[in-house]
Amino acid sequence: MNDQAEALRNLIKQRERIEEGRQTRIITVTSGKGGVGKSNFSLNFAIMLKRLGQKVLVFDADIGMANIDVLMGVSSRYSLYHLLKQEKTIWDIIQLGPEGLHFIAGGSGFSDLLNLTKEQLDGFAEQIDKLHGQYDIILFDTGAGLSKETVKFIAASQETIVVTTPEPTSITDAYALIKMVIGMDIHIPFKLIVNRATDYREGRQTADKINLVSSQFLHMEIPSLGIVPDDSNVSKAVKRQIPFTVAYPSSEASSAIERIAMQFLEMPKAVETGGVKGFLHKMFRLSR
């Protein structure tokens, strides 16, 4: 019995050392306009990162159209709202999705976050700070477009993934989002995802257009993280409320997401900005 107790204590100590050494990566996924498949990308990207050994938490931070739980076919009991009202702890509102993916449901909570009293902010910060070292990646799926809430998440994160499609309006809006953020003197590394491309050539041309204009007028390169083809299995999965990487793991879209996740993990990380603590500091500073 003593040997078992000692083994348990050693296991706990080992786990604590791992968590202390883990550098949590804060990522925002956004888009210049709605309807480009941003949330679907976020969800399946997170699932693939988890398959590749990463411990991932997805925040549904889309204030107006929170739908990550709908895409998974999961009924959310709690959301950020319950945390802000101090009815639940951070651990209470973290829920399990497909393949054990951890997520926090969206809703009105994120809009409330921007109008908290100092006491509420302190309580929220204390809870969120507990996530430090618990995850390799925390991914915020934000609202589409140029809202002040989306800008705050982009500014507070370590890196931002912009999702676009080859449609001219989508390209224009993606560039407008990047231009606005840079114009606010916010220096965050951007990466680009081209979704629903007819073929690789069209996706590559789309990525090159945005990078060329950004390099010429914003003096900033926007590297492409990858291209997701227009795949009928994606819409089938949405109707079934199952992530397409789970429902159709051998589909072209799933293979593309796997390549993107692998490339993302191989790319150099953004300069460390304090993980969860740094995110909170910048978020609250921007909210005051």
Image: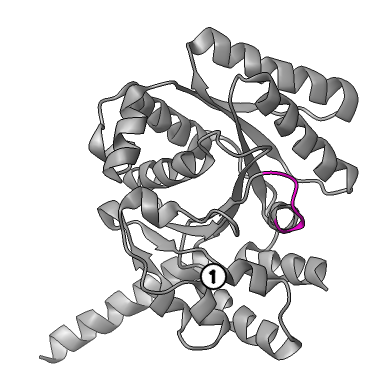
Question: Where, by quadrant of the figure, is residue 234 drawn?
Answer: top left
Residue identifier under label 1? 132
Residue 148 within the magenta-colored segment of the rendering:
yes
Q: Residue at x 30, y 37 (%)?
A: 237
Q: Report the side of 170 relative to 230 (left or right).
A: right
Q: Nearer the viewer, residue 245 or 266?
A: 245
Most foreground residue, 173 or 11: 173
Residue segment shown in magenta: 145-149
Where on the picture, by quarter, is residue 62?
Answer: bottom right
Tell me which secondary structure the magenta stretch mostly adopts.
loop
Q: How is the image coloured?
A: one colour
Q: Is residue 56 above or below residue 178?
A: below
Q: Quadrant of the C terminus?
A: bottom right
Res. 55 in view: no
Left or right for 233, reference 21: left
Position of residue 49 measured from the top left corner of the image (x, y, whole percent): 40, 44
Image x and y of residue 285, in percent: 81, 70
Instruction: Bin the neighbour count of mark 1 within 10 Å (Cα to Cα): few under 14, some 14-19, many 20 and up.
Output: some
Residue 269 horizontal/vertical position (percent): 61, 44
Placement of the N terminus among the 4 image quadrants: bottom left
Instruction: Please give the name of the residue rendered at 78% of the width and 17% of the height, measured from the top-left corner.
Output: 212
Is residue 163 shown above or below 93?
A: above
Residue 271 included in the magenta stretch of the image: no
